[in-house]
Amino acid sequence: MKKYHDIKDIKFEEDFLLITVEGLSHRFPLAGISSRLLKASPAEREKFEVSPSGYGINWPLLDEDLSIDGLLGVSHIPALKKGKAA
């Protein structure tokens, strides 16, 4: 399985999501990314799972998923197949 991101730390500070990806720390306001996380209790926020590929984070108690690509504004361009023009 391809590993998309190396996620090292996920935590909350007031109404912000703090995440370390590929050794870089990022801070996201919950109001801008997830109303469910914004309204969630600390216990609901702390119960999460990182996908094995590092592609996303799931909060099962909230039925909420966030993609790391979406948070970071990353898009993956598929490789061109051999012999096909762009």
Image (spheres, grey):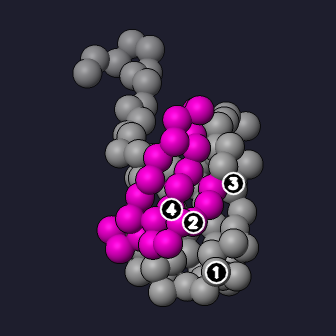
Q: Which residue is mark 3?
A: 51
Based on the picture, tell me whether residue 12 belongs to the magenta stretch. yes
Of residues 75 and 86, which is closer to you in this image? 75
Residue 56 point in image, percent of width and height: 58, 55
Q: Is residue 59 above or below residue 40?
A: above
Q: Kindly report the distance in space between the C-alpha atoms of the residues bearing marks 4 and 1.
A: 12 Å
- Say which element carries label 4: strand
Residue 53 seen in this snapshot = no
Q: Amino acid at mark 1?
A: Pro
Q: Kindly report the distance in space between the C-alpha atoms of the residues bearing marks 3 and 2.
A: 19 Å
In the image, taking residue 80 as reference, residue 25 lies left or right, namely right
Q: Residues within 10 Å of mark 4 (few under 14, many from 20)?
A: some
Q: Which residue is mark 2?
A: 12
Of residues 53 and 62, which is closer to you in this image? 62
Circle 3 or circle 2, nearest the eye: 2
Is the Cβ of the residue at disc 2 closer than 8 Å to that at disc 1?
yes
| Label tally | 4
Q: Which residue is mark 1?
A: 42
- Say which element carries label 1: helix
Query: What is the span of residues highlighted in magenta in the rendered image?
Result: 10-32
The quadrant of the picture occupied by the C terminus is top left
Q: Amino acid at mark 4?
A: Leu
Q: Residue at 68% across / 77% down in the picture?
A: 60
Is the Cβ of the residue at disc 2 closer than 8 Å to that at disc 4?
yes
- Say which element carries label 2: strand
> Which mark identifies residue 7?
none
